[in-house]
């Protein structure tokens, strides 16, 4: 006689906590076929702990070298380091341009104030006007 162990079902939050990943990562793994979700009701989605353990063997750990035959560079390859250096240089250039632009604005208009309250006010006005428009359309 074959004995089977009962399946332990976890909610998505429990699965995320068990794997120490975000919900988005769990959904991404589902989309790639790594993990299977099981619907137990109209609003109840569960994942078996065994599926999660199997998934851990399929997902490479962060910083782990790519498999030899994959054709993908490892995280420490020269190409990756060059790309990171190029991106960092582009970021420095953009930040320098933004600072120069801000200095020009300050020279022309004086000290610039924080724009957050102004933007919030504009958003509230836009929300009110779109709420009024949707009420009229109905």
Image: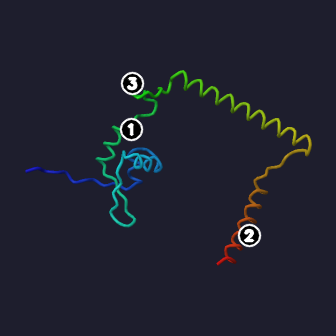
Left or right of 95, for residue 67: left
Sequence-wise first label, 2 or 1: 1
Q: Specify the farthest residue to the top.
A: 78
Q: Crowding at label 1, few (<14), some or many (≥20) Cα neighbours within 10 Å?
A: few
Which mark is nearer the camera, 3 or 2?
A: 3
Label 3, secondary structure: give it. Answer: helix
Spatial CA distance of label 2 from label 1 is: 48 Å
Going 78% across and 35% down the picture, which residue do you hit? 97
Going 69% across and 33% down the picture, which residue do you hit? 91
Going 44% across and 50% down the picture, which residue do you hit? 27
Coordinates of residue 124 in the picture (x, y in percent): 73, 64
Left or right of 98, for residue 111: right
Q: Looking at this view, is 18 or 109 the one in front?
A: 109
Left or right of 63, for residue 123: right
Label 2, secondary structure: give it. Answer: helix
Q: Which residue is mark 2?
A: 129
Going 40% across and 65% down the picture, which residue do you hit? 43
Disc 3 to disc 2: CB gap under 8 Å: no
Coordinates of residue 14 in the picture (x, y in percent): 39, 52
Sequence-wise first label, 3 or 2: 3
On residue 100, the disc is: none
Q: Looking at this view, is 23 or 14 the one in front?
A: 23
Quadrant where the image shows the C terminus: bottom right
Q: Crowding at label 2, few (<14), some or many (≥20) Cα neighbours within 10 Å?
A: few
Coordinates of residue 134 in the picture (x, y in percent): 67, 73
Relative vertical location of residue 53 with respect to residue 66 in this rendering, above or below: below
Q: Crowding at label 3, few (<14), some or many (≥20) Cα neighbours within 10 Å?
A: few
Q: Which residue is mark 1?
A: 59
Q: Which residue is mark 3?
A: 68
Q: Looking at this view, is 16 or 125 the one in front?
A: 125
Relative vertical location of residue 81 with respect to residue 131 in this rendering, above or below: above
Quarter location, residue 137: bottom right
């Amino acid at each position: 006689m074959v004995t089977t162990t009962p399946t332990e079902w976890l909610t998505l939050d429990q699965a995320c906590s068990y794997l120490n990943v975000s919900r988005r990562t769990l959904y991404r793994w589902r989309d790639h076929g790594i993990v299977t979700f099981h619907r137990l009701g109209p609003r109840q989605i569960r994942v078996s702990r065994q599926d999660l353990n199997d998934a851990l063997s399929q997902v490479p750990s962060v910083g782990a070298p790519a498999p030899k035959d994959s054709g993908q560079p490892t995280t420490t390859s020269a190409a990756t380091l060059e790309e990171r250096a190029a991106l960092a240089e582009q970021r420095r250039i953009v930040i320098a341009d933004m600072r120069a632009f801000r200095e020009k604005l300050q020279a022309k208009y004086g000290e610039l104030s924080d724009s957050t309250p102004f933007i919030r006010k504009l958003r509230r006005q836009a929300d009110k006007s779109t709420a009024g428009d949707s009420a009229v359309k109905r």
